[in-house]
Image: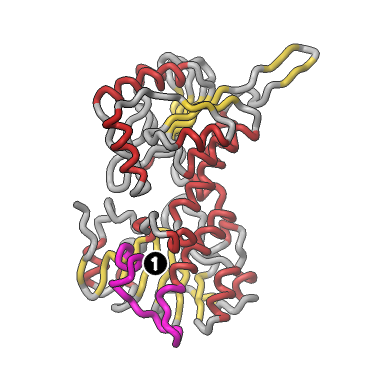
Amino acid sequence: MQIGIPVEKVVGEHRVAATPETVKKLVGAGHKVVIEYSAGQKAAYLDDAYTQVGAALVEDAYLQSDIILKVHAPQGEEIRKIKAQTIVIAMFDPYRNTALEQFAQQGISAFALELLPRTLSRAQNMDVLSSQANLAGYKSVLLAANEYQRMFPMLMTAAGTVKPARVVIMGVGVAGLQAIATAKRLGAVVEATDLRPTAKEQVESLGGKWLDVPMSAEEQQRAADAVKNGYGWTPGEQYIKDQAAIVDKAVANADIVITTALLPGRNAPRLIHAATVVKMKAGSVILDMAVETGGNVEGSQVGEIVMTANGVKILGIPNIPSTIATEASALYARNVFNFLETLFDDNKQPVINQDDDIQKALLITHGGTLLFKRG
């Protein structure tokens, strides 16, 4: 059984799908692991580290591999290299990936890690979205702090007192909670908002202030039901208006705003409009973590720092986990390894079981058929 680790081709991607730690486990289990030259170099995993744990360095990891591990799904010429019945495990961005039919036509069994059922407790150690979002939430605060022209903590000096930064976090999922914790550790005053009322306790436990929005009994029930699937809910018209007013005031007074709201298979919700940005102070910073899927912030641009007429910086930094590639690769590789282990039988041969809840959810192409339905 040969497992291949190719170089990531996506521009700006520094992560790698397997680290020396996980390769050692795979080799120890009796698998042959081949990794392309310099595949882990941008994440500070050098070729020698892989060879020391038993991997073979190759020019093309697709050649003769039975299983391919990647961060991003293969594209273009990469797909054409893959032989029939190969298993590919990666993040496929299935709702927007236009090449899924090609994987099916070539008889590839493709597993999209983003589709992991988040409500299954046994799947938690395979959850790439959570592991990467955790790191992104941490790094987003540091990236915003780097662009902010003032201090985060209160500072008392002979020349006067420096006030702490006011930080607003919009979206209190994994990334948002880590952003709150990081901003608090840096000494900022933190406020946060989310569509899930249950997030209030989490925010306050980290020392943040909850931006409370009044809710009707019906909305409270709908929000509670949405918690069960691990994602957000669709609020009513009145709630949207009430939230907009509260958020507008908080953002207008903020020094730094970080938005984290994402919706599976849909464009990111617009949380901050230009009319609100205009009210912010010169020198304020907004970091839009959802910029790659349409953006939470009006005016944000992928890969750019937009300076508004009133002196507000809007950061559109894509793929934030890649900016902390060593740790991001380590966590991602462990997630992948944990899922990969579930595919092997007692003879260390891969067996695809479509009755298994996890495999069924992740398997998007198999046996020449496109299984994933965007609708």
Q: Position of residue 272 (x, y in %)?
A: 37, 25
Residue 73 found in image quarter: bottom left
- What's drawn in magenta, residue-wise? 341-362
The reply to whether residue 133 is visible in this rendering is yes
Q: Is 19 colored magenta in this rendering?
A: no
From the top left corner, tell me how far across and down residue 313 is, in percent: 48, 25
Indicate whether 101 appears above or below 252. below
| Mark 1 crowd level (few <14, some 14–19, many ≥20, 10 Å Cα) | many
Residue 156 spot, x, y in % from top left: 75, 18
According to the image, label 1 marks what residue?
A: 89
Residue 60 in sight here: no
Which one is in front, 210 or 299? 210
Relative to 205, 274 lies left or right: left
Q: Residue furthest bottom?
A: 347
* Total tally of numbered discs in the picture: 1
Q: Position of residue 284 (x, y in %)?
A: 52, 21
On the rendered structure, is 211 left or right of 225?
Answer: right
